[in-house]
């Protein structure tokens, strides 16, 4: 009995961390000329969505979570021992899409990286494959969370932006902008995907606050404040460093 207890104590932590946090599902891939991401992805990253994470990106169905799943990072591995790499591939969510019972529709390049060296053609011939996935923290070494002002913004009457280089493992649920003349936080609208907008924004510089929460929803959400990130003379197309890294 002593030995059995000892064995259990040795085995359990390993089992829990290696099995319990992966979820079984399926993935397919979409075709695009460069095999990279889709610049028209529903999250609203635009051209940047093509090259995010080096093009290892994908669309998700239920994991999209109304757009708050945009920018989330997942480790995906397929389970066919001869064809699939053990560690799989890390991808970033840039789009919304379904394909049968698959939770992921990856860029062709991301899908190919599931395979062992030289096995990509065989793997791609399957079209759809069984996978295991888990959420992992996004890492953008050398970058802070950054605000990319959307091109369709029109200074000073209409402001729309999306977050890029969103590190860590939390969803951005809501964004509010400080209205100095009323001394209150004013909610921005989630226009679509990861894009937040506001008509007639207050005059800058604009303090913002973000409501963030882990995906499981078990923990409480919290607010992260960004002080004067968007300058008074903000410009469509510009990117502004927030000096903050989400964890
Ligand atoms: C990120 O933020 C830190 C301050 O928190 C700042 O020192 C650093 O220059 C920022 N990085 C970039 C790339 O702007």
Image (spheres, grey):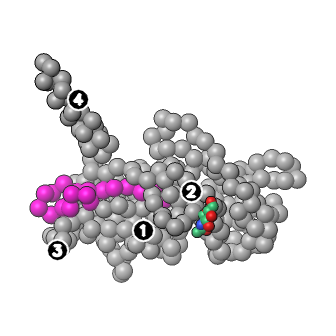
Q: Secondary structure at mark 4?
A: helix
- In x, y percent, where is residue 226? 68, 55
Q: Is mark 4 within 8 Å of ligand 1?
A: no
The residue under label 3 is 118
Q: Residue furthest bottom?
A: 33
Look at 51% across and 36% down and name the residue there.
219
Cα distance in 3D space between marks 3 and 4? 40 Å
Estimate the spatial distance between the alpha carbons at disc 1 and disc 3, rounded to whole Å: 22 Å
Mark toward the start of the polypeptide (1 vs 3) = 1
Drawn side of residue 23 relative to residue 92, left or right: left
Q: Is residue 140 magenta?
A: no
Which residue appears at 34% of the width and 49% of the height? 134
- Circle 4 sits on which residue? 9
Mark 1 Cα shell of 10 Å, populated few (<14), some (14-19), many (≥20): many
Could you say which is closer to the camera, residue 87 or residue 178? 87
Which of pointers 1 and 4 lies earlier in the amino acid sequence?
4
Closer to us: mark 4 or mark 2? 4
Give the SS element for disc 3.
loop
Q: Quadrant of residue 245?
A: bottom right
Q: Which residues are magenta?
A: 71-88
The residues bearing labels 3 and 2 have C-alpha atoms spaced at a distance of 37 Å
Residue 120 horizontal side relative to residue 171, left or right = left
Q: Position of residue 54 (x, y in %)?
A: 40, 72
Disc on the earlier residue, 3 or 2? 3
């Amino acid at each position: 009995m002593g030995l059995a207890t000892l064995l259990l104590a040795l085995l359990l932590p390993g089992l829990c961390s290696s099995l319990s946090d992966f979820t079984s599902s399926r993935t397919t891939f979409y075709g695009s000329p460069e095999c990279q991401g889709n610049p028209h992805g529903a999250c609203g990253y635009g051209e940047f969505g093509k090259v995010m994470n080096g093009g290892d990106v994908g669309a998700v169905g239920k994991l999209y979570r109304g757009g708050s799943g945009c920018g989330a990072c997942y480790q995906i591995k397929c389970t066919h021992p001869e064809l699939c790499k053990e560690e799989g591939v890390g991808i970033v969510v840039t789009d919304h899409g379904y394909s049968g019972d698959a939770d992921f529709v990856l860029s062709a390049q991301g899908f190919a990286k599931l395979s062992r060296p030289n096995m990509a053609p065989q793997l791609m011939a399957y079209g759809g494959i069984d996978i295991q996935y888990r959420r992992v923290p996004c890492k953008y070494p050398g970058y802070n969370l950054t605000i990319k002002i959307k091109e369709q913004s029109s200074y000073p009457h209409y402001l729309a932006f999306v977050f890029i280089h969103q590190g860590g493992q939390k969803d951005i649920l809501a964004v509010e902008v400080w209205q100095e003349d009323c001394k209150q936080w004013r909610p921005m609208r989630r226009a679509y995907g990861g894009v937040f907008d506001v008509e007639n924004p207050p005059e800058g510089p604009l303090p913002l606050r973000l409501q963030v929460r882990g995906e499981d929803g078990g923990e409480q959400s919290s607010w992260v404040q960004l002080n004067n990130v968007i300058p008074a003379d903000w410009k469509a197309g510009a990117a502004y460093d927030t000096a903050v890294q989400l964890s």
